[in-house]
Amino acid sequence: MDPWYMPAATRAAQFADFREDHRRSVVEFQPFRAELLGTATDGTALRLTSLNPYVNAWFVLETGEGRSARSWHLENAAPELFTVSLGADGRTLTIDSEAGTTTCTPWDGELEAARASNLPYAPICDQRLFVRNHGSGSRTTREAVTDFLRSYVPFGESLINVIKDTLYEDAYLTSAQTMDEAEAGSVVAALGQADLRSHPVMRSNLRVDLVGAEATQMEAGSWYAVQNAPGIYASVVQPGMVSQAVLNVPGANGLDGVENRSDVHMFAFDLSRFDLRYEVGTDHPQVDWSPRPSGQGRDYSLPGPDGFGTVDPLQMTGMLNPIFIDRVAGIFAGGFKRDHGAWRLTDFAYTNHGHHYGFVVNGVVLSRLQPGLATIYVLQDGSVHMETWSEDLNSLLPHIRFARQNGTPLVEPDAEGVGVPGAQVRSWMGGNWSGSAEAQLRTLRSGLCERAVDGRQILIYAVFMSATPSGMARTFQAYHCDYAMLLDMNSLDLTYSAVYAREPGSQTFTIEHLDRRMAESDSRHRDGTPMGRFIEFSDNRDFFYLLRR
């Protein structure tokens, strides 16, 4: 019998409570949570809560009662392989897999040691699970993580090999690490060219090694395969190059001379080769109130729009789990922090508590997904979706592993399924586009779009050096996007993106940024070599990352 079995009536009651407004903890907020109770051999009370048994990734382990109670945030980094529970006798932590059963009693000192290590991910139970510790991003912590990364092979390889041998077999890494020029060329041909007035050669701040071309000599609107990064492509353009046919589609404002001449850099990811994942930063986005909603949009009796103002006892690491470092292929920054992630005016400001942007990590709802907002989400099966959230989609919540909302769509499909400017692209307040008090919307911005190409799903991340929502929409239209959304804005730090190129057969990588100036956001190892942001030290902002399949 499933150890996390819950009667249908209980599940329905929890989901109904999830939709209500009252004070609670983030754990009590989870609509699919289930718990098991036990007692350690020394009589210590144990409570293990699976925050979403469908996803099977995050758990809270509580030891003791009353003033002696302690809690620990556990992560199952291989939810496809391992099922975590308390043993039938309630005295052991049990990890089941097709390869057998592992039991442990981490409350006998291992949990304390894991917390004292200050590692964002501290392994326990024969390296099958991790205790998550809040990351700080301080130099001391970075050095500790660096040492951890450089010595993680003894346990990291054991888990990686289990995953390789039992889930992905021989194809786990090798089949996805190479791409010959013919295959790269076929994808480039399928991507085609953007719909532009002209395709001049550009020299921009995009500096990556390309297959058969130089980054300083890229034709605008064309795609180029990134060298030693199979499945990743690069392009450059300026909004002023967009064709008149695109500009004739109604729904966006005209572009000024500065915006027309500003560079746009893009990475495209062939999602058949990658798993897309999302992680929250150590500080952002938060779960308390944005200062923007007021009046009917704010309930001062609650610490946050969902009934809680912190994620305690959950621990936000601000970096990916280092066991995935040999699979990481790309990173890009997330969306608005909570302060800006809600509406000040329009109907959205006065309903649903101001429509704070929602987000989900490893199946755990940290902020409700709000109807009407542009949403990217990843299901348990790894499929990636972008669409405007609606109440009808709430049936997917048990199976959503990752999700992030950020405003309203830049591009959405029309009745014929063709991408056109979103309904709020021309409205400063309606789209919550942010910018100056004078509604000067032109600034550095990043965005995300998807398109289908010959049966392939392509995810495009773009940084616009100086653009309005209208300029972003027109550019994404020209690149034949079906749906597009804003992410963050105003600095290269907040729109960071990099890919990690590896020579065939090598486990070391080269960090290549979407804009060479983004390298300033990275750090350095003690020997002077680059230390990749989000993958080798904790960061305060949220981010997406792509792992090779």
Image: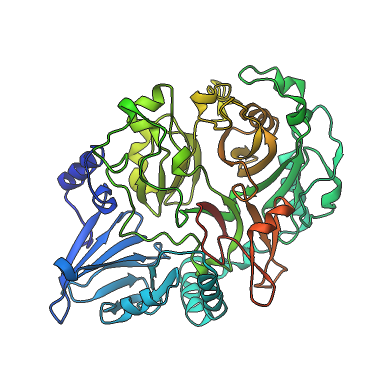
In terms of image quadrants, where is residue 83? bottom left
At which x and y percent is residue 349?
39, 27
* Residue 195 in sight in this render: no
* Residue 519 in sight in this render: yes
Colour scheme = rainbow
At which x and y percent is residue 120?
45, 68
Q: Residue at x 73, y 30 (%)?
A: 259
Q: Image quadrant for the N terminus?
A: bottom left
- Between 423 and 120, the one lying in front of the other is 120
- Between 445 and 180, the one lying in front of the other is 445
Q: Residue at x 15, y 44 (%)?
A: 9
- Whether residue 526 sits left or right of residue 409 in the image: it is right
Residue 288 lies, with reference to residue 148, above or below; the image says above
Q: Residue at x 70, y 51 (%)?
A: 514
Residue 146 lies, with reference to residue 390, above or below; the image says below
- Whether residue 223 sits left or right of residue 382 in the image: it is right
- Whether residue 353 sits left or right of residue 6 in the image: it is right
At which x and y percent is residue 476?
66, 33
In terms of image quadrants, where is residue 530? bottom right
The residue sitting at the left extreme is 43
- Between 546 and 102, the one lying in front of the other is 546
Q: Image quadrant for the C terminus?
A: bottom right
Residue 249 lies, with reference to residue 292, above or below; the image says above
- Whether residue 105 sits left or right of residue 536 in the image: it is left
Residue 75 lies, with reference to residue 276, above or below; the image says below
At which x and y percent is residue 374?
49, 34
